[in-house]
Amino acid sequence: MRKPRPVQPDQDLDPTADSGGSEGNVRAVDRALVILNAFREEDGALPLVEVARRAGLHLTTALRLLGTLESHGFVQRLAVGGYRLGPTLLLLGDRFRRSLRLEDQVMPALERLRTESRESATFFVREGDHRRCVFRLDSPQLVRDHAHVGEVQPLGIGAHGRSLIALDAPAGQRPRLPIVTRGERLREIAAIAAPVLDAAGGVAGSVGISVPLYRFDAAAEALCVPLVMREAVAITRALGGDPAAILN
């Protein structure tokens, strides 16, 4: 999605109207999106002059666009003065979250992991005190671990089992991510896994790679660890989550 371009004040010498036709309509939409992006998480209500300053717009133009945004619920004008973001944005965000299909985000990530590592790639979700394999792509190599979609395994043991609860610990006591285990759940298998977060900040699952232990040398670990973290971050962002918690 194209990021709205901040409008410079010297581009807005005519505060009463945009240029005609479709070009003017596009410019008005662009300016409206700039106004929405002017609001920050820590803001309370913003006065008109501050909205205009941040958006780089003339006061009259900002007022006109805010009026249109208000009529559609994208901003609210408070009785005590000032503007804040409106409930329509929350509704759209909720629609966005509901429209996401986990499979659409996870399967391309697993395909990338398998292709680049040539090892098996798996995604687990937590179910109470257990974890369930919900997506998996097997290694193209003859010697590989064997697991099945739908299989239930213990929580808290193995890379995925530890990954799913890694963020339960206080911030200063959390394990380093991704989790790397050698022969912990299965004696002959090494695994690398990292949690994936959803838009609410919850753990949506765990993505990772499993490798026969005899192939998991220093070079294999150096290859697989950044791949797993890359895909954990990518899926988190695709789900609308903030990857900061898994990167720290």
Image: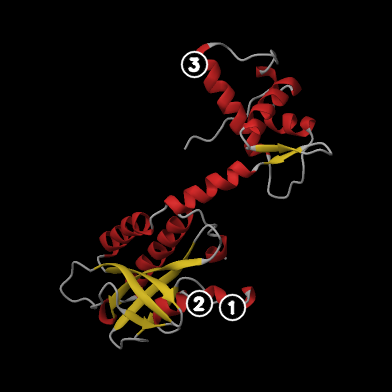
x then y, percent, for residue 240: 50, 53
Residue 211: which disc?
A: none
* Residue indicated by mark 3: 22
**In 3D space, how far apart are the residues under numbered discs 1 and 2 (Cα atoms)?**
8 Å
Residue 169: which disc?
A: 1
Residue located farthest toward the bottom when viewing the structure as drawn: 187
Q: Of discs 1 and 3, which sits in the foreground?
A: 3
* Residue type pointed to by label 1: Ala
CA neighbours of label 2 inside 10 A, class few (<14), some (14 to 19), many (20+): some
Q: Quadrant of the C terminus?
A: bottom right
* Residue indicated by mark 2: 165
Q: Residue at x 26, y 69 (%)?
A: 119
Looking at the picture, does residue 74 appear above or below residue 162?
above
Q: Determine the image quadrant of residue 154.
A: bottom left
Please tell me whether mark 1 sits on a helix, a strand or a loop: loop
CA neighbours of label 1 inside 10 A, class few (<14), some (14 to 19), many (20+): few
Q: Residue at x 26, y 81 (%)?
A: 214
Taking depth in this image into account, of 192 and 201 the one nearest to the observer is: 201
* Residue type pointed to by label 3: Ser
Please tell me whether mark 3 sits on a helix, a strand or a loop: helix
Q: Residue at x 77, y 46 (%)?
A: 44
CA neighbours of label 3 inside 10 A, class few (<14), some (14 to 19), many (20+): few
**In 3D space, how far apart are the residues under numbered discs 3 and 2 (Cα atoms)?**
52 Å
Please tell me whether mark 2 sits on a helix, a strand or a loop: loop
Looking at the picture, does residue 4 appear above or below residue 98?
above
x then y, percent, for residue 225: 40, 68
Q: Are marks 1 and 2 in contact (CB under 8 Å)?
A: yes
